[in-house]
């Protein structure tokens, strides 16, 4: 007979304990939670230097517990960001569809007017518009992303993250059970109502990535169950009628962006955000387009594994290859 699965409360206690033990070995590190469910500020570490094994373990434990960790005053070069990121896993090419920084295949430029933002027409703005989990169109979406702030507006431009484990746990048991059996189709497309520019369409067609993922994903490291419903990528729930899929998705997206599951981060030059892409969604700020200030950040992403649902079934690639590490990628 199979042993019963640990409860969400038991899993959360394990994550607390893992973090407590890791911090006992790294007393120079501090971890200050930023909201009830998500986000912690990590201090007492210089990310320009190679980290000790214990520091890597403590940052990883903080990441798994708090889903996104923030650092301040870390003025890293491109090479230092790449070296820092590599200590946590293999790196993907900057972006599998929108490219990378010249000379640094591991880096993706998050510029204010980047190609991924190019579309025309009136997007239908809804509370969840722009929220996404990175590259869930891929069969193996990144495990984590590390974003470094370089040029930051004096005001505006904050990023928000939401905890998809907390969001899932807040659903009723019957709805959780219903969702566990469902899978959805993820693909690149501009927000509802907007129209892709030719440039956007050409880039997406050159590297078509479409995948079917479970709606509830079991986290490969923590065993936690997360509502894997990236609003930016998930286009329909397979097996449901079109109207059923639309209404259910809109309910789930409205639910997962509820403010109590989220944290909002105010950037400074030298700030770093490191998030667990298997347990979060985030939204890039829109208010910067109402301001004249520039905004420039750089992102690395860690190679992820293929998601697995509560029923043990893995995701299916409908189009495109998995996202490989930089040394194995065809760039
Ligand atoms: C991203 O979506 O990875 C970028 C977030 C941001 O620009 O704040």
Image (cartoon, rainbow, N blue to C red):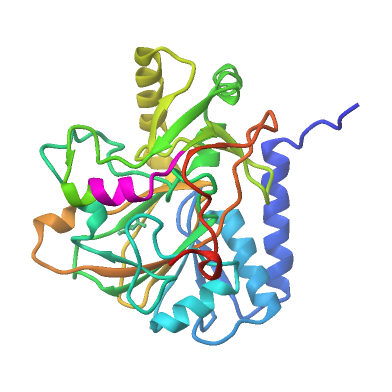
Q: Position of residue 157 (x, y in %)?
A: 24, 60
Residue nearest the observer in this picture, 156 or 281: 281
Residue nearest the observer in this picture, 241 or 206: 206
Q: Is residue 121 above or below residue 87?
A: above
Please report the residue visible at 60 percent of the width from the left and 67 percent of the height from the top.
Answer: 89
Q: Position of residue 91 (x, y in %)?
A: 52, 67
Q: Is residue 81 left or right of residue 197?
A: right
Q: Is residue 323 above or below residue 326?
A: above
Whether residue 74 can be seen here: no
Q: Position of residue 329 (x, y in %)?
A: 50, 64
Q: Is residue 105 left or right of residue 111?
A: right
Q: Is residue 4 above or below residue 29?
A: above
Q: Is residue 119 left or right of residue 56?
A: left
Please report the residue visible at 60 percent of the width from the left and 45 percent of the height from the top.
Answer: 306
Please report the residue visible at 73 percent of the width from the left and 51 percent of the height from the top.
Answer: 14
Q: Is residue 61 above or below residue 160?
A: below
Q: Is residue 165 magenta?
A: no
Question: In this view, which residue lies farthest toward the right?
Answer: 1
Q: Is residue 286 left or right of residue 45?
A: left
Whether residue 137 can be seen here: yes
Q: Is residue 205 magenta?
A: yes
Quadrant assignment, res 254: top left
**Quadrant including the N terminus:** top right
**Quadrant including the C terminus:** bottom left
Residue nearest the observer in this picture, 239 or 15: 239
Q: Quadrant of ligand 1?
A: bottom left
Please report the residue visible at 42 percent of the width from the left and 28 percent of the height from the top.
Answer: 252
Q: Position of residue 229 (x, y in %)?
A: 45, 35
The magenta span reads 201-210
Quadrant assignment, res 2: top right
Overall secondary structure of the magenta stretch? helix
């Amino acid at each position: 007979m199979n042993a019963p699965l640990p409860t969400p409360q038991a899993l959360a206690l394990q994550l607390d304990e893992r973090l407590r033990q890791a911090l006992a070995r790294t007393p120079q590190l501090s971890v200050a939670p930023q909201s009830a469910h998500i986000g912690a500020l990590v201090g007492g570490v210089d990310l320009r230097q190679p980290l000790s094994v214990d520091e890597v373990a403590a940052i990883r434990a903080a990441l798994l517990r708090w889903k996104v960790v923030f650092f301040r005053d870390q003025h890293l070069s491109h090479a230092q960001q790449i070296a820092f990121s590599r200590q946590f896993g293999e790196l993907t090419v900057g972006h599998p569809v929108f490219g990378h920084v010249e000379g640094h295949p591991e880096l993706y430029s998050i510029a204010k007017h980047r190609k991924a933002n190019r579309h025309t027409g009136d997007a239908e703005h809804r509370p969840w518009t722009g929220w996404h989990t990175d590259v869930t169109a891929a069969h193996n979406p990144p495990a984590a992303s590390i974003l470094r702030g370089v040029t930051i507006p004096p005001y505006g431009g904050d990023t928000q993250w939401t905890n998809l484990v907390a969001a899932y746990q807040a659903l009723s048991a019957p709805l959780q059970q219903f969702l566990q059996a469902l899978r959805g189709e993820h693909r690149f497309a501009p927000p509802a109502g907007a129209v892709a520019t030719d440039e956007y369409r050409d880039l997406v067609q050159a590297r078509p990535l479409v995948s079917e993922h479970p709606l509830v994903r079991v986290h490969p490291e923590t065993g936690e169950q997360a509502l894997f419903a990236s609003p930016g990528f998930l286009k329909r729930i397979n097996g449901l009628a079109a109207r059923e899929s639309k209404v259910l998705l809109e309910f789930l997206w409205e639910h997962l962006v509820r403010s109590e599951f989220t944290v909002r981060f105010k950037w400074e030059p030298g700030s770093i955000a490191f998030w667990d892409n298997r347990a979060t969604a985030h939204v890039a700020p829109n208010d910067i387009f109402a301001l004249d200030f520039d905004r420039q950040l750089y992102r690395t992403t860690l190679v992820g594994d293929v998601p697995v649902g509560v029923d043990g079934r893995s995701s299916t690639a409908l189009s495109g290859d998995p996202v490989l590490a930089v040394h194995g990628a065809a760039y």
